[in-house]
Image: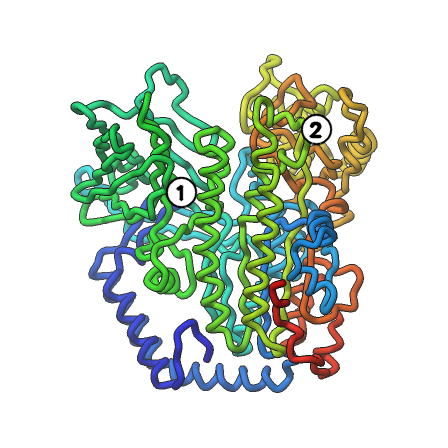
Amino acid sequence: MKTFFKINTEQLKIIIFTFFLILLIIIPNNLYAYIGPGAGFAFLSSLIALLVSFILAFFSFLTLPIRIVIRIFKRNKSKRKSHISRIVILGYDGLDPDLCDEYMAQGKMRHFKKLKEKGSYRRLATTYPSISPVAWSSFTTGANPGRHRIYDFLTRNPKTYLPELSSSRVDPNIKSIKIGKYRIPLGKPTVSLLRKSKAFWEILGENGIFSHIIRVPITFPPQKFYGALLSAMCTPDLRGTQGSFSFYTTKSGKTDSNYTGGQLFTLNQESKNVYKGELLGPDNSIKEPHTPIILPFTLTVSPESEKCVLKIKKDKYTLKIKTFTPWIKVQFKAGLGIKIYGICQFYLKSIDPEIELYVSPINIDPEKPALPISHPYYYSVYLAKLFGSYGTLGLLEDTWSLNENVLDEDSFIKQAYKFQKERENQFFYGMEKTKQGVCACVFDITDRMQHMFFRYLVKGHPANKNKDEKKYANVIEDLYNYADTMLGTVLEKIDDKTLLFVMSDHGFKPFIRGINLNSWLYKNGYLSVKNGDLSQEYLQNIDWAHTKAYSIGLAGIYLNIAGREKQGIIKKSEQEQVKNEIINKLSGLKDPDSGKTAINKLYNSSKIYKGPYCADAPDLIVGYNTGYRVSWDAAIGKVTDIVFEDNTKNWSGDHGVDPEIVRGILFSNYEIKNDDPNIMDFAPTILSLFGLTPPAFMDGKVLSIPELTDKKKISGKDKNKAPKEN
């Protein structure tokens, strides 16, 4: 049995397993607390939780020997058919083939170049649309979106037209009893993974093959399988959002109370050099009304030393100017002995002339998680005990704080690389413990840094007005070289019994101009608003009785179909006609300011998807040309008078364009014969290499790797070793 523990005998494994079952028994409050969008908290009484946990632990203990025997039998059966003992997947979100080619041609990225020359390098076809949650879901399941049901970060509820998270859902509907000012839940809300089909590591686990899956997107909440998993993209913060930072200032005259992705708060002076503030916690759902739990703090400023002392309850921390603190533990009390644990980082931006303090989104504490963020439950705890606390938020790098100019470029870079180091510790430990099976890890830094710094690869980008374009001109090149250095470390740690895939889910292009699809639909008679009232978010004030099509999110356009949308007007017999009209008008759309083609083509979803969940897809997928993307307003369902506008935000690179021009990368230490690999090909290939037949729902093909399937060994002992330093 493979685990992330260093174990040599089955007897020792049973002891450790039993220990963790006991651990679960003695911390029932954490097991039964849950934070999610709109869900608040729910808990069972300690007595009930203890009883249930004990019964489950006792039953698991009794059946453990039987399950071990079955698992060993399955593992041995698979092992006899396997072509490989270990597969390592190094995922770099968004690593772009054009930039890889450019840097390799310049003599950089030498470890990538080595893989290209001695193994394989291909451009990897991505999904429609080329958006991370969609692409990684196809990587995980080997299926097209019509089978896994993820088409975007958000989906729209056809009954309300409002956006909802596409990957997970919280159902807070539980019975409760009211005692005074408290409403006591008698159960717990459920959180469900909405991605359909089956992950390849689940199938491996059913056949006795262990996997370490670290931060692969769309794995929240984690599902049970034979392996260890740490959730990633779409894991919420402690407030149930996808990441809400806080910014505190003493500056007067600030009228905006909110940023996109964060909130502004005032620091109030308590006495000389002492200021008060409040951390905003999750809503307290056991008290009525459900208001956020507040955690007060004080700042004592020392101007001469350029430091502050932060005090939270009895704990004190020294804050230095322009320096991130380590993760600081915070505790929110809901009442009746219920405590919710989080972690956050503080960044003292300035103390003169005004105090400015940034606080990261409050992450779920991996040592005392208030909702399931790993499988097994204790895996997140175990990693924290090994390496210290670490970020758990799905979108961890705080891009919105840089977009809103709360953090500057230098501080964002520091933050991103700090989080990168956390992930590296987890990945290399997982590699070390995976002697047989799969170890897969996805690194987000390549995606987040390109989103925020691609403007420095484009001379005169509208986001760089009045900025020094030379100062950050090499940030992305340095990022790619960093990825290459890390690859060199991986190559030193693998042998000829390990298959290495280095891959990305898509590439990157500059985002210079935004297109508001709703504005175009409005101006062309496909969308109507009440009383001419424009610019309301989330499709508010739309006259649905006279609207044929609308857009929300990043992927494309929905038709207002009768029987599907609550106020739909398009009959089934009219759908294809309306689709074709919009396709013909929007495909090849020109930018009036430059004359450039802004939209290459529109894709009819009924022709590119297959499977039981096609009805949930946008009806049209928009293939933008390089330099263009859906505008910020259109993404949140606004209708304005403007169709084209400059992108002036720091978020200046993107991949939500025509999938044909933003393919990912695939490098391997073994030769791959296929010229046209697809991101859907990983799952069936991995299963096949372990001697398993890919299930029928997988659309990907099994990649041809003759050196493995023909049982040939690699000649030369140094095939997978990194080249020596010059």
Query: Which residue is the site of mark 2?
Result: 548
Farthest top residue? 531
> 153 left or right of 377?
right
Counting from the top left corner in percent of width and height, residue 82 is at 63, 81
- x%, y% of residue 370? 33, 52
Q: Looking at the picture, tell me which residue is in the foreground, 358 or 124.
A: 358
Neighbours of disc 2 within 10 Å: few (<14), some (14-19), many (20+) = many
Q: Is residue 713 left or right of residue 86?
A: right
The residue depicted at 66 percent of the width and 17 percent of the height is: 641
The answer to whether any part of residue 564 appears in the image is: no
The circle drawn on residue 591 is none
Please tell me which residue lies in front, 479 or 708: 479
Q: What residue would you read off at disc 1? A: 240
Element under label 1? loop
Residue 637: quadrant of the picture: top right
Q: Is residue 505 above or below residue 645?
A: below
Q: Is residue 626 visible?
A: yes
Question: Seen in the image, is 295 located left or right of residue 577?
Answer: left
Which amino acid type is shown beneath numbered disc 1? Answer: Gly
The residue drawn where x is 20% and y is 61% is 47
Residue 426 drawn at (x, y percent) = 45, 62
